[in-house]
């Protein structure tokens, strides 16, 4: 089984386009079609539906995809082991990450990462939607939510501490809340998906449903609206640390910490083999963020 044919098949599964997938690998449309034909002939099954308008995987192709990805990862691992691991990670590393975290804390570090691994190229998709890694053909997903898929492995990259905060302008106008119950009557800014706020109190956990004057689906937008005095909100420290340092946002009700077990995770498909390019990315960002990420120092 030709590894180049497998790589082409995996890229077709992502792009749904034979010509586009072939172009990524330096192949003409005719050569790409020939490679897929040879792969299908060797397996004795049709992997791809071809029409004049689109390309999609057959049921056999869907079943075969994770095996093809594992074979590619195994070959990369074998190559890297030559010379006691002296071979640099190669190929294209496909990553999906939350939009705000990716823009603020992954993109700024990519120049240094690529300088360490000059044989790598990156495909980075920034989206707040939870994307199916196998279907999307991603090697790594960065997530700040719980892991529900048992077929995936997660490694913690950093903590995701969250605080209740407001702008000095808002607090000067409306006064600082003294208790959790005070929040019920205040203007709040909600992040979609976080409908209740839960706090630790001496009597145990207390939950409230805030009165949201404004709801949005992007953490940076929520932070910016809060800094402009619209209301009180919950922010991840990694998102609001610069505003906190500048005093544009200040913590509220620090005596009642938020209940949260979130973290920043690097998630990848479960396998006994970890591709060198995946390991390189994870190790780099674990070291960059460290035990106390730079955004926690303020």
Image (cartoon, helix red, strand yellow):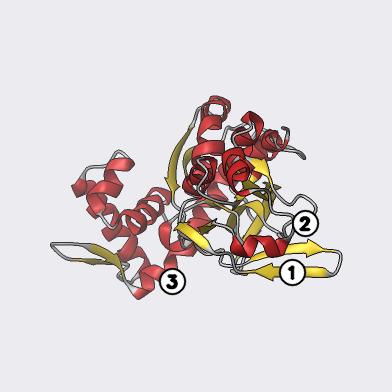
Per the rendering, the mark at residue 206 is 1
Q: Position of residue 265 (x, y in %)?
A: 63, 52
Is residue 37 positioned above or below 277 on the image? Answer: below
> Please, what secondary structure does the residue beneath circle 3 have?
helix
| Rendered location of residue 135, percent (x, y) | 42, 63
Q: Give the residue at mark 2.
A: 256
Q: Residue at x 47, y 53 (%)?
A: 138
Residue marked by disc 3 = 63
Q: How far apart are the two marked residues, 2 and 3, measured between alpha carbons?
A: 49 Å
Distance between mark 1 and mark 3 Cα atoms: 46 Å
In x, y percent, where is residue 243? Answer: 59, 35
Q: Marks 2 and 3: CB-CB under 8 Å? A: no
- In front here: 184 or 155? 184
Residue shown at the point (74%, 59%) measured from the top left: 179
Left or right of 261, for residue 114: left
Question: Could you say whether the residue bearing mark 1 is in a helix, strand or loop?
Answer: strand
Quarter of the image with the N terminus is bottom left
Q: Tell me the SS state at disc 2.
A: loop
Nearest to the observer: residue 244 or residue 266: 244
In the depicted structure, whether residue 184 falls above or below residue 12: below
Q: Nearer the viewer, residue 188 or 19?
A: 188
Local crowd at mark 1 within 10 Å, few (<14), some, or many (≥20)?
A: some
In-front residue for pair 171/192: 171
- The answer to whether 292 appears left or right of 191 in the picture is right
């Amino acid at each position: 089984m030709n590894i180049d044919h497998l790589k082409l098949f995996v890229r077709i599964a992502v792009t749904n386009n034979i010509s586009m997938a072939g172009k990524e690998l330096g192949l003409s449309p005719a050569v790409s079609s020939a490679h897929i034909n040879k792969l299908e002939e060797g397996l004795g099954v049709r992997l791809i539906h071809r029409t004049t308008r689109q390309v999609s995987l057959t049921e056999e192709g869907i079943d075969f995809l994770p095996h093809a990805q594992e074979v590619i990862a195994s070959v990369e691992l074998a190559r890297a082991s030559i010379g006691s691991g002296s071979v640099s990670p190669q190929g294209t590393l496909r990553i999906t990450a939350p939009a705000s975290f990716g823009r603020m804390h992954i993109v700024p570090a990519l120049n240094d990462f690529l300088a360490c691994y000059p044989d790598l190229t990156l495909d980075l998709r920034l989206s707040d939607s939870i994307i199916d890694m196998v279907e999307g053909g991603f090697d790594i997903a960065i997530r700040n939510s719980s892991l529900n898929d048992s077929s995936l492995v997660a490694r913690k990259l950093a903590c995701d501490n969250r605080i209740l905060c407001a702008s000095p302008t808002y607090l000067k106008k409306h006064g600082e809340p003294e208790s959790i119950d005070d929040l019920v009557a205040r203007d709040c800014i909600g992040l979609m998906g976080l409908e209740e706020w839960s706090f630790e109190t001496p009597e145990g956990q207390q939950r409230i449903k805030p009165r949201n004057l404004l709801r949005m689906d992007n953490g940076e937008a929520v932070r910016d609206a809060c800094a402009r005095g619209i209301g009180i909100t919950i922010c991840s420290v990694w998102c609001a640390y610069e505003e906190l340092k500048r005093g544009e946002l200040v913590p509220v009700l620090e005596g009642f910490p938020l209940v949260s077990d979130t973290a920043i995770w690097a998630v990848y498909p479960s396998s006994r083999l970890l591709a060198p390019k995946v390991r390189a990315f994870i190790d780099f960002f674990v070291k960059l963020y460290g035990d106390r990420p730079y955004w926690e120092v303020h």
